[in-house]
Amino acid sequence: MREFLGVVLGVAIGIGLSSVRPRRLRAALLVPGILAAGVVTSAVNGELGTDLWAVFVSFDTLLAGLGVAFGLAPARTGLVPRIASALQRRAQ
């Protein structure tokens, strides 16, 4: 169950990256963000102290990458701007 942390962190990173406008900056932040999420997930799960820490970090990084894909998908399909405009109209 603790492995979902990587996916959740990845989704958060993906949503955050979707608001970054320059595509080059978004691309430059993508890999370090995914790697950081993988390392944080392994650290929280206590896997960095084992002999197989590289395997755990690799797996958690893959999960974070999957989460980033899930986080970026609504922004790529235009769902996020539609939701934001609907909430803005509702607030008025």
Image (cartoon, rainbow, N blue to C red):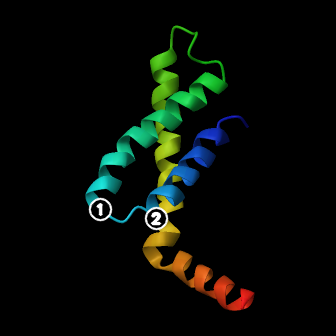
Q: CA distance from mark 1 to mark 2?
A: 10 Å
Q: For mark 2, give the secondary structure.
A: loop
Above or below, 44 relative to 83:
above
Is residue 70 visible in the rendered image? The answer is no
Q: Residues within 10 Å of mark 1 (few under 14, many from 20)?
A: few
**Residue in the picture at 48% in, 71% down:** 75
Tell me the kind of residue under disc 2.
Ser
* Nearer to the camera, 33 or 42: 33
Is residue 5 visible in the rendered image? The answer is yes
Q: Quadrant of residue 49?
A: top right
* Nearer to the camera, 80 or 62: 80
* Nearer to the camera, 14 or 1: 14
**Residue in the picture at 56% in, 30% down:** 40
In x, y percent, where is residue 43?
60, 23
Tally of marks:
2
**Residue in the picture at 59% in, 86% down:** 85
Residue of label 2: 19
Q: Residues within 10 Å of mark 2 (few under 14, many from 20)?
A: few
Above or below, 91 relative to 34:
below
Which quadrant is the C terminus positioned in? bottom right
Q: Specify the label residue 65 is tagged with.
A: none
Residue of label 1: 23
Above or below, 20 relative to 29:
below
Q: For mark 1, give the secondary structure.
A: helix
Tell me the kind of residue under disc 1.
Arg
In x, y percent, where is residue 84?
60, 79
In x, y percent, where is residue 53?
51, 16
| Tags 1 and 2 touching, CB below 8 Å | no
Above or below, 60 relative to 19:
above
Which quadrant is the N terminus positioned in? top right
* Nearer to the camera, 33 or 6: 33
